[in-house]
Every structure is written in C-alpha cells, then in structure tokens.
Image (tube, grey):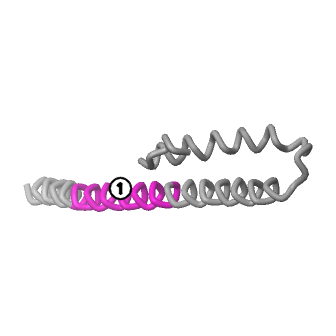
Amino acid sequence: MTNNNQNVSMEEEFRAEESYFYEYDQEMAEAVTRADEEDNDRQQKEDDDSLLRLIVDVQCYLSEAPTDSPLFALQYKMYTYLKQRASEMGMDVTSI
C-alpha cells in the first residue's frame, strides 16, 4: 500500500510541477511573441522612414534637374505616394 501511495504522490507532484511550468512556458511564449511584434513594428517603421527619406532626396534632386528629365514621371508617382502617406497619418492633404 505504501508503494501505491508513493506512486500517487509522485503523480500529483508531477502534475503540479507540469502545471507550474506550463504557465511559465506560456508567459515566456507570450513575452517572446510581444518582443517579435515590437521588433517587426520597429523594422517596418525604419523601412518606411528610409523610403520617405529616399523620396524626399529624389524630390530635391529633381527640383534642381533640367525640365526635360526622364525622372519626372517618377516624381509624380512619389508625390502621389507622399500625399497618400500624409493622408494616412491624418494630415489635411486638400491644399497639397
């Protein structure tokens, strides 16, 4: 009978330990997921910022370029992109 009680006690201990570590594992998985999401958001923002810097630099270059530059079609596309992004950011783009 003692051996049977020992087995039951060990099983209960194992379940309690498993439950404790399951909660810990869940918390760690959630923390890793949150960190990954924050990293992805930060990377997306950096990518967006880099694209906007490129567009502004090209716009500055084109403002000094000759009027027959083949890049003017690109300039218009970048202008419409900037206008769309400004609108998404909540800026009033009616005067642009």
Residue 60 point in image, percent of width and height: 76, 59
- Image point 15% across, 56% down: which residue? 12
Q: Is residue 6 left or right of residue 37?
A: left
Quadrant of the snapshot with the N terminus: bottom left
- Residue at horizontal 49 percent and vertical 55 percent from the top: 41
Which quadrant is home to the C terminus?
Answer: top right
Q: Determine the image quadrant of residue 44.
A: bottom right
Residue on which the image places disc 1: 30
The verdict on residue 3 being magenta is no
Q: Which residues are magenta?
A: 17-40
> Magenta stretch containing residue 25, yes or no?
yes
Q: Is residue 16 above or below residue 94?
A: below
10 Å neighbourhood of mark 1: few (<14), some, or many (≥20)? Answer: few
Instruction: Say which element carries label 1.
Output: helix
Residue at left 61%, top 47%?
A: 82
Which sits in the foreground, 25 or 72?
72
Q: As drawn, is 51 to the left or to the right of 17? A: right
Q: Is residue 28 above or below residue 55?
A: below
x and y, in percent, of residue 10 in the image: 19, 59
User: Looking at the magenta stretch, what is its main secondary structure?
Assistant: helix
Identify which residue, 24 or 39, lies in the foreground.
39
The three-letter code of the residue at mark 1 reads Glu
Q: Nearer the viewer, residue 13 or 30?
A: 30
